[in-house]
Amino acid sequence: MTTYITTPIYYVNAMPHLGHAYTTIVADTYARFRRLAGDEVRFQTGTDEHGEKIVQAAEKEGETPRQYVDRISDAFRQTWPLLAVEPDNFIRTTDPDHIRVVQEILQKVHDAGDIYFSEYSGHYCQGCERFLTEKELVDGKCPDHLTVPREINEQNYFFRMSRYQDWLIDHIRKNPEFITPERYRNEVLSFLSEPLEDLCISRPTSRLTWGIPLPFDDNFVTYVWFDALINYVTGIGYPDGPEFEKYWSVAEHVIAKDILKPHAIYWPTMLRAAGLAPYRRLHVHGYWNVDETKMSKSLGNVVRPRELVDEYGVDTVRYFLLREMSFGLDSSFSSEAIVARQNSDLANDLGNLFSRVLTMIGKYGQGRVPGADPSTLTAAEQELVDAAEKMITSYQEAMNGFAFHQGLQAVWELIGLLNRYIVTNAPWELAKDKARAGRLHTVLYHLAEGLRLIALVLRPVMPQAAEKMATALGMADEMRTATLETAGRWGGMVAGTAVDRGPQLFPRLDKKKKKQQPAQQEQQKRKKTKKAAKKEELPEGMITFDQFGRVDLRVAEVVAAEKIARADRLLKLTLAAPEERTVVAGIARYYAPEELVGKKVLIVANLKPAKLMGVTSQGMVLAAKETDADGNERLVLATVDGDIAPGSKVA
Ligand code: MSP
C-alpha cells in the first residue's frame, strides 16, 4: 500500500511555533506509523510565500520579499530536524516548478470555462487573505482576526465554484471519512446548505505584484489560496510524474480548524474543475492555547519548538503533544502539564519498567534474555499475551483514525499491566530459590518480550527513545526494518539475546515552575484581575464555567475493593482511570466490596490526595444520597449509562 501525507504549507510571515510543530509532528508520526505498517510513504511539508501578508512582513523587516521569504522558509526547514520530523519533500510556492503547475492548472480551468472576469465588491480580511461573506462577520469584524475587513471594489477573475456545490455535498455524504473528525464534516455540510458563491482568484498587479501571474492576463496575479493549495499536487510531480500517479489517489491532508474552508471547499472543487480526483482524507485538529490563553505575539506567550526541545528533549515534546490533545479538540499547553507527563507517564511508568526489567535480566539472566520454561506458564502469561495482542489492534485502529491519544493510552495500558506483573511475580523472590529458576526465566522472558513490542509501537511517536530501547534490547537492526505484520506479534524476542541497560530513558524533572517571562507574568496578572472582577458579579452560590471546568471528572473502573480495618464506613477502592489509583470511599454501609468490582464509577480525579485511616486517597467517588422522613440514609453510586473506556472525561 501507499500513503501520501501533507501538512499545510506555512506562511512565512511568522517564525515556527507550537501550532506549526504540532501539525507537522502529527504528519510525521502518521508517516512513520504507515511505514511501520509496511506502506511506501511520501510526506510533504513546506512554505507558502506569496500574497500581501508576506509583502508587508518583508517591508517591516526592511527586506525585499525574496530575501525575506528565503530567510523564513529556511527557519522552517531547519526546525523540523530538531523535532525528529523527516519530510520527503519540502515545497516552496516560489519554486519554479510550482509556478509552472499553478499556471497550467489555471489555464486548464480557464479553457474549460470555469474562470470568468467580473466586477466585485466585498469584505476583504487581510489576516485570512480572503473575502469574507456577510454571514461570516461578527459585529462587522472577522471572527478569527478581530479586525474590520477592508471594503474592496475591483474587477477580478472568478472561479465558478458554485457549479460544483452539489457534487461536493454528494461526495462528502458518500464518503464519511473524507473530512474527520465528524464535527468538521458537519460544519462543512452545514456551510454548504447555503448557496456557494464563486471564488475570486486574482489580485490586480496595481495592488499586488508578489504572486504568480495569471497565464491569460498578466495584469493580475493569482490569489494566494488558489496558488497554495496546488502545492499538494506539484510536490508529487503533477501532471505526469510517476510519483503523481502513485500517490495522488491516496492523498491525506492534516490541517487545523482555521483553514477548514479552503481545504474542504475550495480545494476539492478546484480539483474537480481541473479534472483531478479529490484527495482521500482531510484530518482537522483543534488549536493549542498556552496556559488556557490564545497564543499570540502581543501577549508574549508564543511557544517556540527550539526552546521546547532544549528544555524537555524531542521525545517528551512529541509524546506530550500527541498524548495531551484529543485530535479535533482544542488543548492547552503549560510547562506544568508537560512536566507532569514526563514524570508520570515517561519517567515513572515507562522508564522505570524499562530499567527494572533490563537490570533484572542483567542480574538474574547474566545479561541475556532467558527462554521461557513452558512447564511454568500460568494464566498471568496468557493475560499478558492477550493484552499485548489487544494493544496492537487498538493502537493500529487509533493511529489510522488519527486518535493518537487513544493509541498511546492503549500502549500505556500494557505498560501498566507489565508493571503489575513484576510486582505480583516478584522475580527477586524467585531468584532466591534455585528450584524456581524455570519460573524466573518465564517471567523475565515475558517482560522482555513486552518491552520489545512497546519499543516497536512507540517508534512513530518517539523515534529516538524507541531506537535507544531497541538498542538496549539487542534488537536495533531488526526493529529498524520491522513491520507490524512481522514484528507486531507475541514471541519475536529470541531467547539468548544480549541486552544492555543503556542510558536512562527519561529523567524525572523538577516540578518547580519555570521562571516566567515578564510579559507572561503581566498577562497572567491581567487575567487574574479580570477573573477577580468577574467573580464579584457572580450570584451567590454560582460558579463559572471555567471554575467547573477545573474539576477533572473521570470514569473509573473498580479493579479491587476491600474493607479498611477499624473504619466501618470506609472502603479502599483500587480504580483504573485508566492508570491505577487508590480512592477511599465512605460507602461501606451501602456496598459490599465484591459487588463493586467491575463497576464503572465517576470520580473527581484532580482532588488533592488526602490520608484517611492511614490510606492515601487519590480522588473522590461520586454518589447520590437521600434521607427519608425517618432520617434513614440511602446512598447509590453515580455511574455511566453505557460502556465507556475507563479514564474518559466527564463534562
Ligand atoms: N499558508 C496557509 C496554509 C496553506 S495550505 C495549502 C496557512 N498558514 S499558517 O502558517 O497560518 O498555518 C496554519 C496552520 O498552522 C494551521 O492550520 C495549523 O496546522 C497550524 N497552527 C497554527 N497555529 C496553531 C495553533 N495555535 N494550534 C494548532 N495548530 C495551529 O494557513
Image (spheres, rainbow, N blue to C red):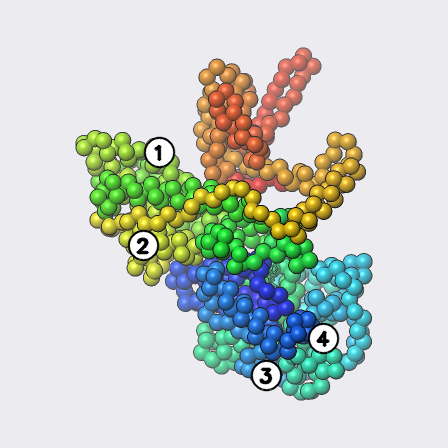
Circle 1 SS class? helix
Circle 4 SS class? strand
CB-based contact (under 8 Å), mark 2 and mark 1: no
- On the question of residue 403 being in view, the answer is no
- On the question of residue 166 being in view, the answer is yes
Distance of mark 4 from mark 2, alpha carbons? 56 Å
**Amino acid type, callout 3:** Glu
Label at residue 200: 4
Q: Give the labeled residue for mark 1.
A: 423
Image coords of residue 248 (percent x, y):
50, 72
Category of crowding for the residue at label 2, using alpha-carbon neighbours closer than 10 angstroms: few (below 14), some (14–19), many (at least 20): some
Distance of mark 3 from mark 4, alpha carbons? 18 Å
**Amino acid type, callout 1:** Val
Q: Give the labeled residue for mark 2.
A: 471
CB-based contact (under 8 Å), mark 3 and mark 4: no
564, above or below 600, in the image: above
Circle 3 SS class? helix
Q: Which mark sits nearer the N-terminus, 1 or 3?
A: 3
Image coords of residue 387 (percent x, y):
38, 43
Circle 4 or circle 2, nearest the eye = 2
Image coords of residue 216 (percent x, y):
67, 87
Circle 1 or circle 3, nearest the eye = 1
Circle 2 SS class? helix
Depth order, front residue of 51/391: 51
Q: Residue at x 43, y 54 (%)?
A: 462
